[in-house]
Amino acid sequence: MQRKILLPVLAFCICWISCKQETTSVTKIAFGSCGDQDWPQPVLTLAANNKPDAFIFLGDNIYGDTKNMDTLENKYKRWQAQPDFKRLDSATKIFAVWDDHDYGWNDDGKYYEFKKESKELFLKYFKEPAASERRKHEGIYHTEYIKSGEKTVQLILLDVRTFRSNLLLYKKGDSLPRKEYFYTPDYKPHTSPDSTLLGAEQWKWLEGELAKPADLRLICGGSQFSIEYNGYEAWANFPHEQKKMLELIKKTKANSVLFLSGDVHYAEISKLEEPGLYPIYDVTSSGITSTWDFATLNKNRLEGPIMENHFGLLTITWEKDPVIRMEIIDKLNNSRIEYTIKGSEIQFN
């Protein structure tokens, strides 16, 4: 009699476990930046092999560095003719922002003379639909969504070039924030609140986007957000703008914000602590082909730096409390960084 009772119970348990496994969905998002159009890009093939739901290019997608639009377009053509890019393009959805080198000129901002023409090429080669909101305003800021069952990832694609004020040059004799600096900084932080990184219209748009529902929000841009000031390009060069972002997240009560960034030619994960706000993580993936000799000081660094060519990968397992795994995978397909948090860690209490 007991055996007859146990068999249906066992069958029910097996069925329940099976159903639970089937209903636990997973979202994979790969990302990277800083790739020279004339160099092989095998990390893009590795990214494609991971079968992500999307790949996000985080700027310096080509090295344009020109004021000749024919030259810029030819560089896009050479890049997208590469076998590695074609494999990625056929394997997943591609989203993108730009940074200075594909915008057109090193470290440039709102005074770059050909930003309108450059935008048209960006939209053309990233196959932006004719009806896209991106075509209706200045700059390339935009929002996309990735759905996984009932779960939604919001991709907030920032433009940190079109509206950005000029940087302040570091001058010999300027004081350094830390005596440990072993290099000479290029730029010092702005002190004037009139300087801007995003510009008034993009800030207004961003507030509306953060108020929309989402289960995870990825704020994507070329400039690192959560690092300390290091003398190179970053949000820390505009400390009032960085503070404005943190206050906006608080104001909108936007849960589950995580930053993805590029630019610096190495990978790292940083964590910024702010009173009244959950930790703000920033995963930097920079080095599809580019490398750098050293990593700057960063007291907010949790993992890294990884100096070899690589791409980044987020894997979100949609459990009751989602599991968010951040990885950096190098050109030899080795997982060099793996850092995991729960969704509840990046929410307001």
Image (cartoon, rainbow, N blue to C red):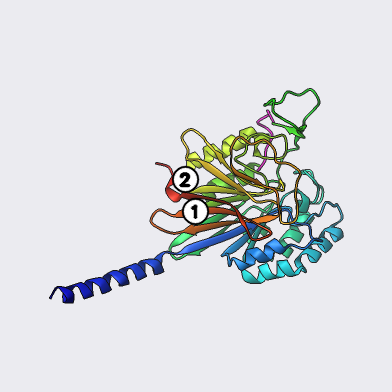
Question: Which comes sooner in the sequence, label 1 or label 2?
Answer: 1
Q: Tag count in the figure?
A: 2
Residue drawn at point x = 68 percent, y = 70 percent:
87
Q: Is residue 308 left or right of residue 26?
A: right
Q: Secondary structure at mark 1?
A: strand
Say which residue label 2 marks.
346
**Magenta highlight range:** 190-198
Quadrant position of the C terminus in the picture: top left
Query: Neighbour class for label 2 at 10 Å: few (<14), some, many (≥20)?
Result: some
Query: Where does residue 215 sit, x and y in percent of width and height?
Result: 46, 54
Which amino acid type corresponds to the residue marked 2 in the rendered image? Ile
Query: Left or right: where does residue 349 sit relative to residue 1?
Result: right
Q: Position of residue 98 (x, y in %)?
A: 71, 53
Please identify the quarter of the rendering in which residue 142 is found.
bottom right
Q: Main secondary structure of the magenta part?
A: loop
Asked if the residues shown at circle 1 and circle 2 are in contact, with their CB atoms under 8 angstroms apart, the answer is yes
Report the front residue among 162 and 74.
74
Residue denoted by label 1: 324
Badge 1 crowding class, 10 Å Cα cut-off, few under 14, some 14 to 19, many 20 or more, is many
State the separation of the CA atoms marked 1 and 2. 10 Å
Foreground residue, 1 or 344? 1
As for residue 191 lying within the magenta part, the answer is yes
